[in-house]
Amino acid sequence: MRVHLLACPNVQTTHDFALDGFCTRTMLFAALLKRLGHYVILYGSEENACPCDEFICCITKAEQKAILGDTPYQNAPFDGSHPLWLTFNARAAAHIRVVKQPHDVIATIGGSAHQLVAEHHPELRLLEYSIGYRGIAPSSSRVYESHAWRHIVHGFTGVDGGRLFDAVIPPWFPVEDFPVLAPEPYAVYVGRLVPQKGVKIACEAAEMAGVKMVVVGHGDTSLVTHGAEYAGCVSTEERNVLLAKASMCLMPTQYIEPFGNVAAEAQLCGTPVISTDTGGFVDSVEQGRTGYRCASLGEFVQAIQLAPTLDRGYVRSRAVSLYGCESADASYRAYFTRFEAIHGDGWRHLAPTLHATAHQGELQTC
């Protein structure tokens, strides 16, 4: 399969832009496509660390700076009518026009912000490969990050049936990046420091439970309250060590989280997660086994007290089976078989597209 993989126009596709989750997903998807043997034409800016067969620069660093000004790259608008996206999309579409072949695929994590590219090439298939956002392209095939988010999207787009060919494949991570260390008596919060993430709830619950609280992230530091320690914005390696040493990771998100990458990352270290009982956490946090999903401050306090009794070996093994690269490879391999079948026998396609998960042994659709 030949894939025109569109990066987002606000970043360089390198690890230096890790604060932008869409950049990280693009890099991981490029690597996955190459592991599965596909031909990848990557469209980005000047610098690239992704494996690919061809790399096309569609926006320069100077243009990014001129358009964004002082806006941090991770806060760039997700809007196809913005000059950042218009510049990128026009050049990507122009290059695709020159090199495209029948049955090529355009792959995006930009959704509707990349729709212009797809509109220039309606005969090509459009794939949104990891949907954890609201700006859905109207004509795409869709892979969601969680079952909860799939149904949320169906709700706000007015879908109450059909779309059976869509799929859910959770985000995946290189397991070797997440160490397993002896836990220390503290709770950790990792993420943006904004009220919607529930930072103050995490701090208050830890104080009430009598547990030290360590907060990592960028944003409004006034939200770090109730005696919590602010560790600042640390490197990815330092962050993972803090996750691995924590007795529990708190994620009291106050909105419906499409997935919540930190929940998977903490569990890959063997660290239990204590979250709200909505969104992607319903998929990622196994109640009473890999953490607790809570509905009140009192439940968060109780969960903090219970979390150290959970089996960290089980927490990690389940996470590896669900969120490791091998699991993603198997899921996307099966999905691409289904994806190709849509344009062939479709509903009556008989090639195997099911696989058993290594951990649960349950038959899963891709």
Image: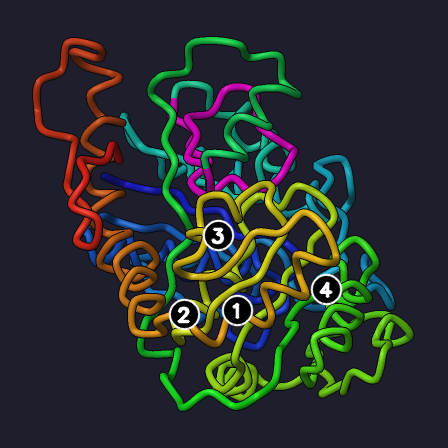
What residue would you read off at disc 3?
43
Taking the spot 52% from the left edge, 52% from the top edge, the residue there is: 7
Q: Are marks 2 and 1 in contact (CB under 8 Å)?
A: yes
Q: Which residue lies furthest to the right in this view?
A: 222
Bin the neighbour count of mark 1 within 10 Å (Cα to Cα): few under 14, some 14-19, many 20 and up: some
Taking the spot 57% from the left edge, 59% from the top edge, the residue there is: 21
- The disc at residue 73 is 4
Question: What percent of the width, then of the height, locates residue 192?
Answer: 73, 65
Q: Is residue 361 above or below residue 101?
A: below
At mark 3, the secondary structure is strand
Question: What percent of the width, then of the height, locates residue 263?
Answer: 51, 61
Q: In this view, does 143 lie above or below 246?
A: above
Q: Quadrant of residue 288?
A: bottom left
Q: How far apart are marks 2 and 4 (CA)?
A: 38 Å
Question: What percent of the width, then of the height, locates residue 340?
Answer: 22, 26
At mark 2, the secondary structure is loop
What residue would you read off at disc 2?
310
Q: Which region shows up in magenta?
A: 124-146
> Mark 1 or mark 4: which comes first in sequence?
4
> What is the three-letter code of the residue carrying label 2?
Leu
Q: Is 126 displayed left or right of 254 in the figure?
A: left
Taking the spot 66% from the left edge, 56% from the top edge, the residue there is: 299
Colour scheme in use: rainbow
Instruction: Give the camera-side residue of 44 and 127.
Output: 127
